[in-house]
Amino acid sequence: MKIETLPSYNEVVTSLRKKKRIKHLLFGNGFSMAYDPKIFSYNALSTFIDDSQNELLIKLFSIINTKNFELIMQQLDNFAEIAKAFSNDVQLVNKIEEASTTLKNSLIEAVKALHPEHVFIVPEEKSQCCHSYLNDFLSNEGKVFSTNYDLLPYWVLMRNDSKIAIDGFGRELENHEGIIKGEDAIFSELRWGKHKEKQNVFYLHGALPIFDTGIDIVKEEYDSQHYLLQKIHERIESKEYPIFVTAGSANEKLNHIMHNRYLSFCYDELCKIEGSLVTFGFNFGEYDSHVIDAINKAAHMGKRAGGKLHSVYIGVFTDENLEYIEKIKSKFMCKVNLYNARTAKIWQ
């Protein structure tokens, strides 16, 4: 089978519409790479770090001989566990853990530095096209799940003033007594939770503008005075970091997810979807088995509730992608269909 023989994206959508089946979207790094592969790829990030002349990180890339951040972090975690088990050298363990922390922080800095400066750099026609693509899911009771860290979905939905995209964040009145006394209303920053029951946009691995303050989950926002990236940068400078799942293995990712109430809520919502799931730019690699587990829970748990996840439509870009997905199809507990992802017009 060749990729050219697969159904097109429009054929998939038409088929689901005829079946009157709710469709949800899961997208990964391929979504952002479709916008600009020079920015949103592991190679772009590693090139940035090479250019930063951080000796520790360059040495890590050289020793492990890969540009996959997740793999390096997994290796570092493994090294740390081995060192703890077989060595009393506390300095060695601390050095390894320091390297892991440095890598994580540098990944955040790299994404931030490589990102388009602000919303108006994304061309209007591309923004509108992407909004139309996302809106086709959201306007038909579907949910959108992202494993990306970047700001593209946020910018697209904000710039097009989407009324139906709900990420669960909202403001809360902070001076109820003051209002009674005639004072002007004072509202909180954007806190997660107020609208979570209606939430239909989920960042499974976190995102650059989402922070855990220890008490609240908050979202930085764009305003006329400050670009969003500038505000994120100010938080990072203050040693506050975005909610960002960067652990190597699927188990490490899931552990991180389960220890954060925002991430665990998003993951649980993926476990509950019914109808069909369409994927774009998500390759279901060996570090993504936790996502397959969530899909299988949706297929299994839904049967008890009367509704279930019937099928997943996986977009593939190359014959190599096609061959790989064919090999792992048996891992899914629902029907797996493939389509030609090149035919999905996300940005143009």
Image (cartoon, rainbow, N blue to C red):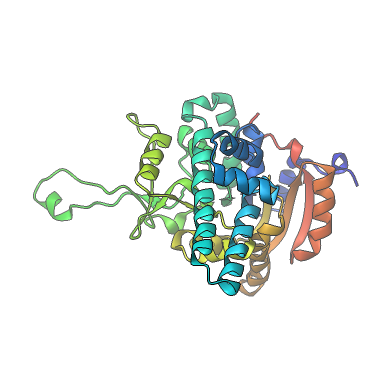
For residue 142, above or below residue 78: above
Residue at 58% across, 25% down = 125
Left or right, 173 with respect to 250, comes to left
Residue 117 percent coordinates (x, y): 47, 29
**How many marks overall?**
0
For residue 294, above or below residue 53: below
Q: Nearer the viewer, residue 315 or 217?
A: 217
Residue 22 percent coordinates (x, y): 64, 54
Residue at 73% across, 52% down = 313
Going by the picture, which residue comes out furthest to the left?
Answer: 181
Residue 334 percent coordinates (x, y): 74, 64
Residue at 57% across, 64% down = 80
Left or right, 165 with respect to 144, comes to left
Q: Is residue 192 visible?
A: yes
Image quarter hosting the C terminus: top right
Q: Is residue 346 visible?
A: no
For residue 173, above or below residue 44: below
Q: Nearer the viewer, residue 50 or 127?
A: 50
In which image quadrant can residue 100 be found?
bottom right
Q: Nearer the viewer, residue 92 or 172?
A: 92
Going by the picture, which residue comes out furthest to the right?
Answer: 1
Residue 347 percent coordinates (x, y): 63, 32
For residue 121, above or below residue 155: above
